[in-house]
Image: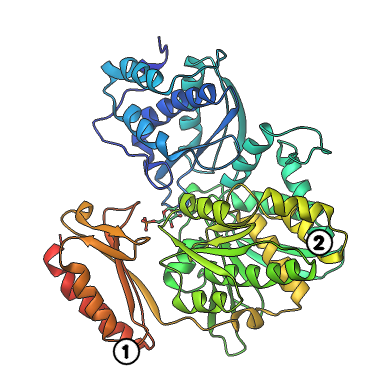
Amino acid sequence: MFAHAHAHPKPANTFAYGTAGFRTKADLLDSVVYRTGLLAALRSAVLGGQTVGVMVTASHNPPADNGVKIVDPLGNMMDQAWEALATQLANAPDSELEATFEAIKAQVQPTYTGAGSVVFARDTRASGPALIAALKDGLADMGATAIDMGLQTTPQLHYVTRCLNSPTDAADAAYFGQPTEEGYFAKLAAAFGAIVGDTAGIAITIDAANGVGAPKAKLLAEHIPAAALAITVVNDDTANCDVLNSRCGADYVKTTISPPPALTLVPNTLYCSFDGDADRIVFYYADAAGAFHLLDGDRIAALATKYLKQLVAEAGLDLAVGVVQTAYANGNSTTAIGALGVNVTCTPTGVKHLHKAAHENYDVGVYFEANGHGTVLFSDRALAAFRAADAPAGRLLHSFGELINQTVGDSVSDMLMVLAILHKLGWAPGDWDAMYTDLPNTIRKMEVADRTIFKTTNAERQLVAPEGLQAKIDAANAAYPAGRCFVRASGTEDVIRVYAEAATDADLAALVANVFDALQPYKA
Ligand code: 16G
Ligand code: MG
């Protein structure tokens, strides 16, 4: 039945559809991507032929890695119930592929009689084209319509997927935009222009991680007048695949708390870093004395909340503004955001959890992980109120609804949102930084014999297993002012992560030492 299956044999490895899809060494992924093609086409058929998205990327991982994930028709991540099916199909022995597929099909029962439709794109990795060829073989074997978007950022693929499943009449309230790259940039540029005008004199330097964000940021620059926003792109070498995410990009800046070595920071000037697929962003600047200041996802959340809440009040709208964070959010950010008069919800790590909570709980749902993944979601009720409003604040909110990517966190869209808000507030980087001071904090990792024994509750803030460990962590936390440490198993690496914060650097060091003592018995 599957004509191309023999060309995509499965290696001996075991695969898992994890936090952000399948992700591992690229040379192991051929069969996984082929089979993801089969599953994406099946998902489309189950959803009545709506177009499903597939993105081939490994985000901030090293150049030799790659990955693949499925996007649902409204541009959100694939229904979590299907993750187990994806894993099951990826791990079926070659001889059982068809039987496994048929068993899955019997379980999900597609009612649509057509063959489905799948739109796909990839980042700049050298392994991308061959994996896309494997994907196309899977789609061909399903007879599915294949829409090849070529090189795109992950958020662009989410955007296009949503557009392909939305009304095409711009007068329709559910119209989302044109399902093209041009449509994406035109929408962002128009919304940004409506907020800041044509001569705002804003400037930003983007570290594009030597990834797909580099050519896309340059395309954005062609759509916005330089007098409104002057964009400089550095770390833009996509011709040399070996430098992707190497000593640059959002992950490097966030984890080292330092600028990419290739940059010399001009004091009091704003910079930002994308990650390898441009769905994550952090900002930073150097003060007059040359000290580095990181403006991470927590701070983006604080800024967006402050400004959007103010606009909602000015527009006289009765809307629930709220924030979603994870346990990695700095405690002082949570306090500062709470002081703005909004509810703050905590979810487990991973964009899909934050996205869901923001969507379910709030009309204006600001969600960011500290690492820079995030966006702001507006409910249909909020968007309708913005459309109907004629006060200036209401019109501004309408433009932010167009500017902010509603499908997933987006480096490009988030960058424009931050720049527009800073411009409206008349804030320099230092004013933004002054919203609060981070508690001293650290993220460590430890290799353990078996990370699966670390089970958490309360949005990953407490361990329920191994037995007795949480009591020791609680005792350590209680010993230091503002001490907060938690331990969880990574979803992307074979390690456990230890996050800690405390009132002073000395307390932090002592707290971490204390918890590492308690962890010694589990060390690999
Ligand atoms: C993935 C997630 C990210 C999360 C990270 C945690 C998406 C698109 N990405 O990169 O949100 O912060 O994993 O990694 O969901 P960890 O489980 O290894 O700490
Ligand atoms: Mg990413």
Mark 2, Cα crowd under 10 Å, few <14 / some 14-19 / many 20+, is many
Check disc 2 and give the amino acid type: Gly
Instruction: Tell me what residue is drawn at x 29 percent, y 59 percent.
Output: 456
Q: Nearer the viewer, mark 2 or mark 1?
A: 2
> Where's residue 395, x and y in %?
83, 59
Q: Image height check: is 232 above or below 510?
A: above
Residue 53: image x %, image y %?
56, 34
Q: Is residue 89 visible?
A: yes
Left or right of 246, for residue 87: left
On screen, residue 432 above or below 327: below
Q: Residue at x 32, y 83 (%)?
A: 508
Q: Residue at x 43, y 29 (%)?
A: 36
Residue at the (22%, 51%) spot, across then down = 452
- Residue 383 is left or right of residue 457, and the answer is right
Front-most of residues 6 and 280: 280
The residue tagged with tag 1: helix, strand or loop?
helix
> Mark 2 = which residue?
394
The quarter in which the C terminus is drawn is bottom left
Is 355 positioned to the left or the right of 484 in the image? right
Q: Residues within 10 Å of mark 1 (few under 14, many from 20)?
A: few
Q: Is residue 39 above or below residue 74?
A: above
Residue 391 appears at what percent x and percent y? Answer: 87, 64
Front-lying residue, 196 or 457: 457
Mark 2 → mark 1, Cα distance in angstroms: 48 Å
Quadrant position of residue 67: top left
Q: Is residue 366 left or right of residue 58?
A: right
Answer yes or no: is residue 248 visible. Answer: no
Query: Which of the labelled discs sits on residue 506, or is there none?
Result: 1
